[in-house]
Image (cartoon, rainbow, N blue to C red):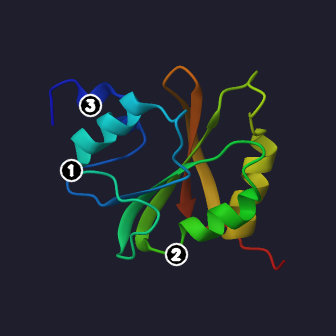
C-alpha cells in the first residue's frame, strides 16, 4: 500500500489490506482510479461477479435502469462474510442514471442492510457503505 492510500476514497470506505472484494455491476463507466485504489489497499485484484468464495466486501455499481436495486443488494449478500460490507456506487446527482438516497435506503433496509455513510467516489460516483444488521422486510 502506498503512503497516500490512507486519504483515498477507498480507504475512507473501510477497505483494508488482505480483504477479498467482489465486484458486481462493472461497466465501461466505472471509475478505474477508485478500482485501482481498492486493489492497492487490499493487495489483490477485485473478484468478478462469478466468484463463489466468501468475500469481505462487495463493490456494487448500480445505475438507474440497471434493474431492481433490492434484488442487487440481496445478490450482493450471497458470498458476503458475517462482518462484511457492501459499497454501493451510484452516479452522482445530476446524472440521468442517478439513484435517489431514499431508494438506496429502502433497498438496503429491505435486503437487511443499513446505510452507514456516503462519500464522493471519484468525479462521477457517490459511494454508500451498507453494513449488515438492517431490518429485512418480507417481500
Q: Which residue is mark 2?
A: 78
Name the outermost residue toward the bottom.
138
Residue 48 percent across, percent down from the top left? 41, 59
Disc sitting over residue 138 in the figure: none
Which residue is nearer to you in this view: 37 or 13? 37
Name the residue at 51% across, 47% down: 26
How many other residues sit within 10 Å of disc 3, few (<14), some (14-19) or many (≥20)?
some
Query: Going from the N terminus, do you reach mark 3 or mark 1 first?
Result: 3
Cα gap from disc 3 to disc 1, whole angstroms? 11 Å
Residue 88 percent across, percent down from the top left? 57, 48
Considering the image in quadrants, where does the C terminus appear?
bottom right
Cα gap from disc 2 to disc 1, whole angstroms? 22 Å
Q: Which residue is mark 1?
A: 17
How many other residues sit within 10 Å of disc 1, few (<14), some (14-19) or many (≥20)?
some
Residue 130 percent across, percent down from the top left? 57, 54
**What is the total number of numbered labels drawn onto the structure image?**
3
Which residue is nearer to you in this view: 131 or 68? 68
Residue 20 percent across, percent down from the top left? 30, 61
Name the outermost residue toward the right.
139
Query: Going from the N terminus, do you reach mark 3 or mark 2 first?
Result: 3
Q: Which residue is mark 3?
A: 6
Answer with left or right where residue 120 lies relative to residue 15: right
Q: Nearer the viewer, mark 3 or mark 2?
A: 2
Name the residue at 74% across, 34% down: 98
Which SS class for mark 2? loop
Amino acid at each position: 500500500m502506498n503512503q497516500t492510500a490512507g486519504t483515498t476514497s477507498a480507504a475512507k470506505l473501510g477497505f483494508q489490506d488482505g480483504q477479498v472484494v467482489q465486484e458486481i455491476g462493472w461497466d465501461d463507466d466505472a471509475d478505474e482510479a477508485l478500482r485501482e485504489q481498492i486493489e492497492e489497499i487490499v493487495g489483490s485484484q477485485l473478484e468478478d461477479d462469478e466468484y463463489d468464495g466468501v468475500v469481505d466486501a462487495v463493490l456494487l455499481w448500480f445505475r438507474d435502469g440497471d434493474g431492481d436495486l433490492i434484488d442487487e443488494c440481496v445478490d450482493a449478500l450471497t458470498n458476503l462474510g458475517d462482518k462484511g460490507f457492501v459499497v454501493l456506487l451510484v452516479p452522482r446527482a445530476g446524472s440521468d442514471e442517478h439513484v435517489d438516497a431514499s431508494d438506496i435506503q429502502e433497498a438496503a433496509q429491505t435486503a437487511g442492510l443499513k446505510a452507514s455513510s456516503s462519500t464522493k467516489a471519484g468525479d462521477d460516483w457517490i459511494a454508500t457503505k451498507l453494513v449488515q444488521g438492517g431490518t429485512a422486510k418480507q417481500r
